[in-house]
Image: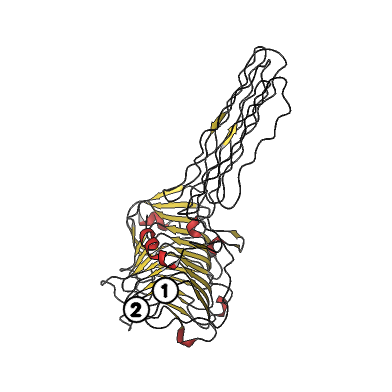
Amino acid sequence: MTSRQRIARSPIVMLLVVPVLLRCGSSDSNPPAGMGGSDASGAGGSTSGVGGNGGTSGAGSGGSGASSTGGSPADANDTGGSPRDASVSTGGNGGSGGAAGASGGAGGGRDGAGGTADGSGGSAPADGAAGAEAGVDSSAGRGGAGGNAGSAGAGGKAGSSGAAGSAGSAGKPGDAGVPPSCAGWASVDAEGVNGTTGGQGGPVIEITTADQLASYRRVAGPYVLRIMNDLSGEFELGSDKTVEGATSNITIHGSLSFSGTLTLTLSNLIVRNLKIDALTSTEDAMDIRFAHHVCVEHCEFIDGPDGNLDVVSEANYVTIAYNKFSYTPAWHPLPGETALNHRFSNLVGSSDTTMADRGKLKVTYHHNWWADRVVERMPRVRFGEVHVFNNYYSASGNSYAIAAGTEAKLVIENNYFENINDPHIFYDNETTAQIVATGNEYINVTGLRHAGQGTAFVPPYAYTLQSGPSVKATVMANVGPQ
């Protein structure tokens, strides 16, 4: 795997050992409580409570700190922090009871690993110290939920002539942050939004009817809308929402879109773990317009009558990852459509004359699969800065795959093109477009592989490139609802 910047998919385990010092005699001053981890990689930090000062006489033992664990991840694709219990140290010979244990620190890295918190009770002259193992870094799969608060540490045992130490404070929850699958443009802090977190932090609502889902179109505040069964309809939703299938076989028959207006821009939206079957729809299977910071991951889109997933009308900071796009023999064009093969999957920018799209339409496509019967637009781009990496193309019989149109800037890296025509082109020989294409795998392909006319752009976010030959197997095993 070739790494430019990091969205590591494999767990990284960090072990933090806090030495235990045991000695007799009067105690020195206590070490300060540790701080919780907060780095962007997602490893949960660990903290150990501070032992209390022992008395000057008596023969009691110091109290031991009770350990608490960080939160578990939200789903199986993300390994959150799961620290082991901290080891417990007992105090030496002492007299009066120790002071109260210090508060446990807050764990939790940005990518979803819960932290540990350990509040130690008072101890006798020997300082009580506890070691804790850091939470496992989660960079592959979906982001885990924030760690739960650690429980309070136990109070120290009383010395022979002193009172018991009071309990330590509970640790704080971890922060799940941006799901790793949403790496790309959706992870960039911009336009007043720090990455894309959707409904994180809000209540989880189990959705069982179409009317119930539709009622959240303009409800303010974060919500996780968990769809429990198949639904039919044309749905639109607003800002700060996560829409997800409860299992891997939940289908929306119709469409699901995030469509703001010139006066109401939407932001911070995630949709995942759904199949969108648009055969009965009169719309795109999904449409993103006048919205920014949108992530669409682990979904399947089929039979969009106009398109499967279009990003248009000043939309910005969008990541589309681990999705499958295809058409079935049942597909039919919209009424009045003259092209009987309008199986055009993904459009970025709807017109050569929409100058308001300049500086917007920043979209990342990674680990997607364009499969059966897709004819073109995988994607077709106008104006945007679009990054296409580690995708798999097998839509045999197609017209073209990727097309750069008016003022488009494309970076096309380490994709796997197999049995298709024209992997990447300047649409109608567009002279204002730029393509950088590197590391791609071309297997039994025909036609054009346009590149050049400029240096496009340098993606400003962290990501990891798989080598071209390894992409096919990874994509096929991981796309779609999980």
Q: What residue type is labelled 1?
A: Met
Quarter of the image with the C terminus in it: bottom left
Q: Quadrant of residue 49?
A: top right
Query: Residue 51: where, in percent of width, then height?
Result: 65, 27
Dot 1 alpha-carbon crowd within 10 angstroms: few under 14, some 14 to 19, many 20 or more? many
Q: Tags 1 and 2 in contact by the CB under 8 Å rule?
A: yes
Q: What residue type is labelled 2?
A: Asn
Placement of 287 over or under 187, stated as above or below: below
Query: Residue 29: where, in percent of width, then height?
Result: 73, 28
- Whole-angstrom CA distance, mark 1 to mark 2, is 10 Å
Say which residue label 2 marks: 398
Dot 2 alpha-carbon crowd within 10 angstroms: few under 14, some 14 to 19, many 20 or more? many
Residue under the point 58% across and 40% down: 16
Query: Residue 38: where, in percent of width, then height?
Result: 61, 48
Which sits in the foreground, 323 or 464?
464
Which sits in the foreground, 420 or 403?
420
Residue under the point 31% across and 78% down: 397
Say which residue label 1 marks: 378
Q: In which quarter of the image is residue 102?
A: top right
Placement of 421 over or under 458, stated as above or below: below
What color scheme is it?
secondary structure
Query: Residue 294: where, in percent of width, then height?
Result: 50, 62
| Labels 1 and 2: the sequence-earlier one | 1
Q: What element carries label 1?
A: loop
Which sits in the foreground, 280 or 426?
426
User: Residue 224, which numbered label?
Assistant: none
Q: What element carries label 2?
A: loop
Which sits in the foreground, 148 or 24?
24
Placement of 153 over or under 277, stated as above or below: above
